[in-house]
Amino acid sequence: MCLQVYIKEHTGYTVQYIPDAKAFTDGPQSLTVLMKQRRRWMNGALFGTASVVGNLNKMVSCGRNDHPWYRQTLMILYMIYLTTLYLLQFITVGAMFVTVVVFLDQFFKVLFVEQSKSEFMVNLYNSRILQKILFSVYLGMVFLSTFVSISLPIDRAMSYFRIVSIFMGILMITSIVGITYFLSQRGFYPHVSECVVVQKGQPCEWQDQPETYFSLLTLAGVIMLSIYLMPILMRPLDFLANFKNYTLGFLSYMVMMPVFTNVF
């Protein structure tokens, strides 16, 4: 409706934001209801955004309407943002997988190699057995979720989706803990590590060199974790007054994030 109002030619209509308007909803009380809701909402949002992006020329055309120049400029910036966000939706599953792979691999390296002097732990990391098992299960669940979603109604597939939700929730919390530990141990200027062969025929050993470098991976991790603190920083008094709700909401969000991305 807002799109149709905005792109009408020289009608004098404008879209206004009313900050006092409030809407309330009954939150889904079960995973089944939540999945059904999100399928409706996400499909609607996807095609709604596609409609807006498809009218890009009308949205940014200064000759079609009477909006002032500053509103037209903001609309151009908004359309660039919206189009980028729309395209990123199609790679979000892969982006989350790559993020989990990179950070957990680095976490295993810090935990098994840099913090442990055990030859068994070093060999375990070098064999990549844990990584292969974890990532194979992760990818398998993603592909199986796609197959189950296409072939079965939600009510009949809920036993499987509950298992997936539990596994991915545990994986997400583990990843956040691992990322936090990795960042605290690594720092912004970690030492360069080289795999040095001590004895011929034996696996190489990771050794820190005197040189340091600026870790973009650490910077990305700090930025990612800091984003979750933004609501608290923007509304500190509300956070203190509703500490329990903020905490439960944050934990629920973190646990359900991979389910939203990979399943819904």
Image (cartoon, helix red, strand yellow):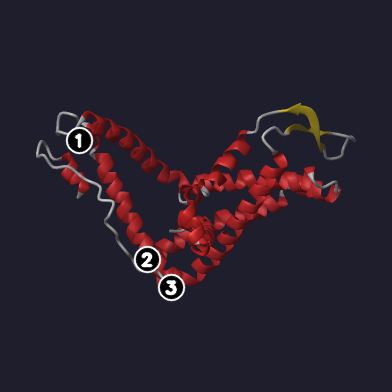
User: In the image, which disc is placed on residue 58?
Assistant: 1
Residue at numbered disc 3: 156
- Mark 1 closeness class: few <14, some 14–19, many ≥20 residues within 10 Å: some
Mark 3 Cα within 10 Å, few/some/many (few <14, many 20+)? few
Q: Amino acid at mark 2?
A: Lys
Residue at screen point 72% across, 51% down = 129
User: To which residue does mark 2 refer?
Assistant: 36
Residue sitting at x 20%, y 35%: 58
**Mark 3 secondary-structure assignment:** helix
- Give the spatial CA distance, label 3 vs label 2: 13 Å
Relative horizontal placement of residue 75, taking residue 258 as reference (left or right):
left
Point out the tag, 1 or 3, that comes first from the N-terminus: 1
Q: Give SS at disc 1.
A: helix
From the top left corner, tell me how far across and down residue 167 is, in percent: 58, 62
Q: Nearer the viewer, mark 3 or mark 2?
A: 2
Q: Relative to 143, does residue 69 appear above or below in the rendering?
A: above
Whether label 1 touches label 2, CB < 8 Å: no
Q: Can residue 40 be seen?
A: yes
Report the front residue among 191 and 151. 191
Considering the numbered disc 2 on the image, is that residue within a helix, a strand or a loop?
helix
Q: Position of residue 176 (x, y in %)?
A: 61, 52
Q: Residues within 10 Å of mark 2 (few under 14, many from 20)?
A: some
Q: Position of residue 239 (x, y in %)?
A: 49, 56
Earlier sequence position, callout 1 versus callout 2: 2
Looking at the picture, tell me which residue is in the foreground, 237 or 231: 237
